[in-house]
Amino acid sequence: MKKFLISILLFITIFFVSDLMIYSLLKANRPIDYKLLIESKKVFFNSENSSDIIFIGDSHIADATDVRIVENITQSTSFNLGLYHSSPIESFYLFKNIIESKDKNPKILAIGTNPKMFTFRTSPGKYTLLVMDNLFLKLDLLKETSKGGFRVFSKSIMEKYLFSTLFKNLMGTNNYKPTREIHKVHNGYLETHNQIPSTKWNKFSKINYLPQNEVQIYYFEKTIELALDNGIEVIIVNPPIWQQWKEEYIKSAIYLEFLETIDKISKKYNLPVYNYSKNDLIQSDFLNIEHLNYFGAQKFSSDLAQWIKVQVPTPIK
Amino acid sequence: MLFNSIDFAVFLPIVFLLYWFVLGKKLNFQNLLLLIASYVFYGWWDWRFLSLIIISSIVDFGVGIGFSKTNDQLKRKILLLTSILVNLGFLGFFKYFNFFAESFADAFTLLGHSFEPSRLDVILPVGISFYTFQTLSYSIDVYKRKLEPTKDIVSFFAFVSFFPQLVAGPIERATNLLPQFYQKRIFEYSQATDGLRQILWGLVKKILIADNAAIFVNKIFENHSEFSGSTLLLTAILFAFQIYGDFSGYSDIAIGTARLFGFRLMRNFAFPYFSRDIAEFWRKWHISLSTWFRDYLYIPLGGSKGNVWMKVRNTFIIFIVSGFWHGANWTFIMWGLINALYFLPLMIQNKNRRYTDVISESKIWPGLKNTLLIGKTFLLTTFAWIFFRSETISQAFDYIRIIFSESLFSTPEGLKPGIFIVILIFSFVEWLQRDKQHGLQFDENRFPRPVRWIIYYVLIIIIMEFGGSQQEFIYFQF
């Protein structure tokens, strides 16, 4: 029996030590833009401070909301927890992690949207698990996304996408240039000044129809309910996209279904929905056709903050 | 609780440590722990249905006590009948009520009198077909005086609900499992490590093979009319591996888990897809159920003794009942019927025991003749699986019709070659291990520890990384 237990312990120890070593190696090879993304968001859970307004959603809200401007105008504290590729189910678990963290409840939850968000497949995503700090919720997210949950035990498996970077770095063939050139980081907002050179501003590829995923809609609503149950005001924020792209996009069934769903949910819970009210966004305000860069974020965040001040009279700070 | 879940990964070490370290010297307490653990394991799914297991256990324990107090044959028969009625009553009520109600209604509709049958809106209790058969084996064996009735209520209840095999077998005989609860268990290092290997292999079968195959099988069976014959043929083959990986994977995990606690469960699968004829297949597939029916139904009916008509009758009865055991649907009955038709010619010609040895023993490759025989048997079973997997008989026939259409020669779509490559590698490993108890059984002296551990690590990583979406075990529904 003693021999058996020692063998098991040794086996598990070697597994986790090797896993940690591989993870460290992978982590060291993480591209700078993604490194900053993850570290900037993790700050929220590592710090003892709470924020009055929390932004969740995917890259659209992450790039669009400069929380410094929101803080100045609304006289609040804010944190941008938008995560690239994040789907509503990921946002739910991230938000639940906030609720279950002691004294982290915000006064306002701003849920950022993306016209494709309800078509995302049910998956634990790429970064959400790396940012969350509650092991049980990570397990729940893995279970709910039907991954069996076992991969939560291996840090290196969760970062598997870095293997190719590691390999390229070892071979000296890594020509990766960061998608976002990040100048500064503040409360989860990554100040990105550049534009993606390969962006086609006038010629767009065909929009393939994808049906909405009921699971994502369900978790979008669950996030709202969780916030409301905890006395948190909820706002829905539609970040802008490049005008010419939008003109093409709104013809698609994906966009129409998205608008219908958002309309239905906002009415169901009586939630205010924010759309950018001005017509002053120019090409240089965009990172690419779907995301704002720093310059666009300045305009957008200012307008959004003014709107929040009017729409949500919750006393903050 | 699913074996392929985090819950079980936490549950098992806790029970194991309590069992050996806290209660290791007290047999009664060990049995009590197993009983409690089994109820927790089952109740994790739905605690309300624990009452069925408890009632079934109380009735059969009482029947056993009754047997011990009387030699009167009539009273003994009444006691046996009580056990049969209660257990099969549960099974009939929860599993077959709606089927019979609908079938009667359909029959009346054919006669021109249509009516809406009353339906039961209850879910099927997980594992009911398994534990009712297990506890029935106790009553029958005690009735036949093959086994002494037990007075140890904890052991008996733990025997009925023993968590490793509670919900999907192997269906243990009281004569094999119950006496193990009376004996002091001694921890054996080699048993425990091989048990862990068997669990690991079971997880590979379930998570890597079955769950990944399920992704394609579910999608294509649900919309079979949209796919070509070639796709449907390959999907039927995928299903053959899905059900094997799913069910034999469960059995491996169950047997391996039981070994960690010092119990030996019966073998349930013996590499059935390497069978050279259907008779051999049925000696290697779901052995615990086949032998249960053989001992408690086939032999009492007369078995293979008697004239040809008796043989034909008994063969059909056992296969059809076996099909019906799997579920209240005509598709399962059809599946049983097809297997009976496969088996019957061998039975009549007394060729059903031609292949009882290990195929191509001590050779690496099977040779042309054996390859053809294996291929033929595999295709026959795969054909029958189409009925097993289909929702209705007409769906199965339509599925087969499309397979045998011109589109059989078109390029398959909707499938990925990766899953077939994985299945090929998996089958090759199983082929190499065909004279062993499971795919990962090996002589520890043959491979040094670092080699063995690297194999385990690789398999664990594969399970974590390539595991398909978590699915329930198919046999839970039976």
Image (tube, coloured by chain):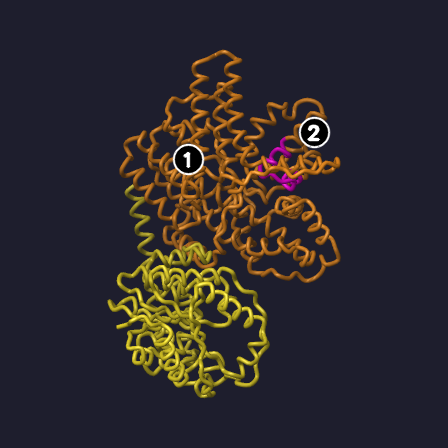
Q: In this rendering, is residue B365 above or below B50?
A: below
Instruction: Identify the chain of the residue marked 2, using the numbered disc in the image.
Output: B
Q: Which mark is residue B312?
A: 2
Q: Residue at x 68, y 49 (%)?
A: B395
Q: Are marks 1 and 2 in contact (CB under 8 Å)?
A: no
Percent x, y of residue B239: 59, 50
Q: In this rendering, is residue A116 above or below B324?
A: below
Q: Colour of chain B?
A: orange
The 10 Å Cα crowd at callout 1, few under 14, some 14 to 19, many 20 or more, is: many
Q: Residue at x 62, y 40 (%)?
A: B329
Rounded to the nearest whole Å, what is the CA distance between mark 1 and mark 2?
A: 37 Å
Q: Tell me, yes or no, whether dots 1 and 2 are on the same chain.
A: yes
B121 sits left or right of B346 in the view: left
| Viewer-nearest residue: B12 or B476 | B476
The 10 Å Cα crowd at callout 2, few under 14, some 14 to 19, many 20 or more, is: some
Q: Residue at x 40, y 38 (%)?
A: B259
Percent x, y of residue B14: 32, 44
B33 sits left or right of B425 in the view: left
- The range drawn in magenta is B318-335
Q: Residue at x 40, y 22 (%)?
A: B150
Q: Quadrant of the N terminus of chain B?
A: top left
Q: Which mark is residue B162?
A: 1
Amino acid carrying mark 2 in the image = Val
